[in-house]
Amino acid sequence: MTRGRIRSRGPGLRTSATAPAKSAPRSLHRRRFELPALVVLLVLLAAASASAEAPVIPQYGPDKHEGVSSCDGSTCHGSAAPRNDRNVRQDEVLIWTEEDRHSQRAYKVLLNRDSKRISQNLGRKKPPHQDDLCLDCHADNPPKDKRRTENNAFRVEDGVGCEGCHGGAERWLRPHDSGATHAKNVELGMYPTDEPIARTRLCLSCHLGDRKKFVDHRLMGAGHPRQSFEVALFSILQPYHWEPDADYTARGKQAPSDVKLWAIGQAVAVDEVLDAMLDDERNRLGLFPELVLYDCQACHHGIDKMRRWRPRQSTGLGPGVVRLNDSNFLMLVQALQLIDPAAAKTLRTDLKALHQGASEGRGDPKAIARRIRANIAKLLPKMEKWKVDAKALRALSKNVLADALGGEYADYAGSEQAAMALQTIVYGYYAEELIDDAVYDGLEQRELTKLLDAVADPDKFNPDAAKKAFRALQKKLAGR
């Protein structure tokens, strides 16, 4: 059974994934485990904004990186086939090498003509495959003194290797090999990728950027592909080298439902966008703010496409105005409508004020951004406790589609995020047995495919065609 496709990671990119048969118990995406309460550490920033603290990103951690070769032994994670008699597959390195774009392929991209042209356009002194600006996201690129150099163990050419996500293994490798608990591994420096907040911050450190590395408007202007990310669906489409089954949770790991991961991921994404807005090192280009935080299609379209402009009451902005990319905010509102309706209403009000402050100079946008961040920090514990059941899935799909048909996603980025959300929600319908194999397959082959086609290319996006695709999906889900 085809598990689904999401398109438009950037112009021209196509990705697909395959699901297990429906009879597979508790495997991959038929997860029924509820997320244990996370320990969320809230810190008050110097600028008086609050944020959920996550562990240090592996690249910046204190531990030495041992290299992929430390993990790829045939009795460790380098098996040529899965070992069904073990708690873990043991063929993780094979999956990463053959199927995962984070592998050596991420590094080899830096050797192609496009990467060299981007580097030249920026006036960089080093070629891309030797430039930290590029290596910071196209490889596991810790400082030189944090690399195991004996026997050429660590190789930046390996791309985003094991430790690029799981943390420098200097302290946890041998205890982990000897059967240490997950909690002990984390204590010794392993990055907790099973935790939604930590996972999202790790992914966004490259798929958006952080205070040490950032895909800014200049980099995109030089030719870098447009950034697009949603943690739940990207996790679904990530070639699975882990099994979130009963054994997985028994070892102390978290396995939130896809929709819960989606909701928490949206909150963290909004927080990271606001952090960039509040960071004067990133949010200034001379007289201009950092334009990568704004909606690309507000400026990048042919004059003939101005006929397609549609008003959005939620922004309070007219045509021809540079406006924030608020797609993650819109999805967070949808989640909060079910988790905390009052908070959703507050966020809608604050988002409109943020739009008007950032685009038209009304009010104090930084004060608004700090207020939203503080509210998100307070809401995250409540989001972690959210029970995503059949009732929640039905309400969520109904609300997202209602806003889509009401014109709230007239912008490309909004429609793209809504399409990704709905694909994850449909997976939730299937997992909760609200739809059977035949209905699921039909949605995948027709309505979802048409919706994904509508957001496949930002340069060809037509809001009316997208609305038509949303309406078709609404009809199919009605009464389910």
Image (tube, grey):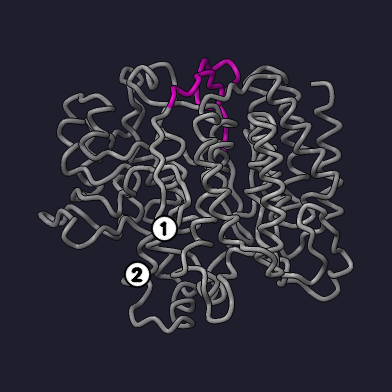
Q: Residue at x 34, y 22 (%)?
A: 252
Q: Residues within 10 Å of mark 2 (few under 14, many from 20)?
A: many
Range drawn in magenta: 17-37
Residue 461 in the image: x percent, y percent? Answer: 77, 59
Q: Which residue is mark 1?
A: 106
Magenta run includes residue 20: yes
Q: Is residue 119 above or below residue 258?
A: below
Residue 129: mark in rendering: 2
Give the SS element for disc 2: helix
Amino acid on which disc 1 is placed: Ala
Q: Which quadrant of the structure image shows residue 396? A: top right
Q: Is residue 190 left or right of residue 449?
A: left
Q: Is residue 153 above or below residue 22?
A: below
- Secondary structure mostly seen in magenta is loop
Q: Is residue 466 above or below residue 319?
A: above
- Choose the circle earlier in sequence order: 1 or 2: 1
Q: Are marks 1 and 2 in contact (CB under 8 Å)?
A: no
Q: Residue at x 76, y 30 (%)?
A: 442
Viewer-closest of 373 and 248: 373
Q: Is residue 146 visible?
A: yes
Q: Outermost residue, left direction?
A: 150
Q: CA distance from mark 1 to mark 2?
A: 10 Å
Viewer-closest of 154 and 221: 221
